[in-house]
Amino acid sequence: MLIIDDEDDIREVAALSLESVAGWDVVTASSGAQGLARAIEHKPDAILLDVMMPGMDGPTTVQELRKNPATAKIPVLLLTAKVQSSDQRRFADLGVEAVLFKPFDPLTLSDQIAGVLGWS
Amino acid sequence: MPTKPAAQSERKTAPELTAAIDLLWTRFQPEIRKRVDLLDLAVAASAAGRLTAEERETAHGAAHKLAGTLGIFDLDRGTVLAREFELITEREDKFDSTAAGRMASIAAELRNLIENRK
């Protein structure tokens, strides 16, 4: 699992959660550009991607991931604190697997992700 | 059906995870305090009638981050308050006395929550 989020606290709690609760291997990145490089390098099973980041934001990062054959098919779950319905419609148009909301529950985040992705 | 990634890391029990999150809280609390400082700056500038668009946007961004973060650390009330501050500061640079008072009240309650998290 690759987690891309510019906020250190969110990124570290999410990583701790997925490693500790589900036992997944987690790689992290603090920007969209770094995330693209990590995605190519590590070929994660899925990407948990923050929406609002300085520089390359989440939606732009999704577009860049989709352009590259090496990363085009990696499932992406957006992570956002935005709750407005207009934002949700915009995110749905990106073709991501799901939109998850901050704050998340560290105890159940991995179940939420596994459920969305149909991981048995 | 795709399968879940193989478990590689050492799993923790719920109490162990909570203890690990508490350690992260201790580490990140100074940064979280700084976000509330930005809310206070906007409140003070607004009260003095000199809130700039940049200060308002900075406070709005800090409130957005607090809204996303505090609930993760079991401060659900903090997320609700920060989201309210975020909505108040979404567009306007000038606030009536009711909104300004509410912003001050939210910032104070957020600081209290953050300082007193067990």
Image: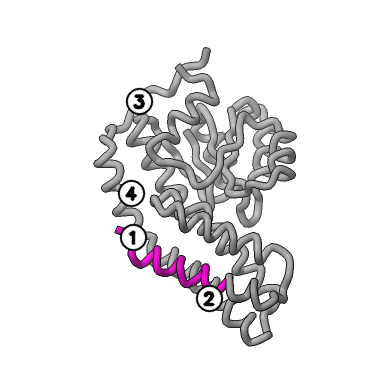
Residue at which label 3 appears: B7
- CA separation in Å, label 3 and label 4: 21 Å
Q: Quadrant of residue A76?
A: top right
The local crowd at label 2, few if under 14, some if 14 to 19, many if 20 or more residues have their Cα within 10 Å, is some
Residue at which label 2 appears: B40
- CA separation in Å, label 2 and label 3: 44 Å
- Three-letter code, disc 2: Asp
Mark closest to the chain's N terminus, 3 or 4: 3
Chain under numbered label 4: B
Mark closest to the chain's N terminus, 4 or 2: 4
User: Where does the magenta region start and end?
Assistant: B103-118
Chain under numbered label 3: B
Q: Are marks 4 and 2 in contact (CB under 8 Å)?
A: no
The residue furthest bottom is: B48
Residue A78 place in picture, x, y as percent: 60, 39
Residue at which label 1 appears: B117
In the rendered image, which quarter contains the C terminus of chain B?
Answer: bottom left
Mark closest to the chain's N terminus, 1 or 3: 3
User: Which element type, helix, strand or loop, lies under badge 1?
Assistant: loop
Give me the residue at 45% from left, 35% from top: A109
Residue at which label 4 appears: B21
Q: Nearer the viewer, mark 4 or mark 1?
A: 1
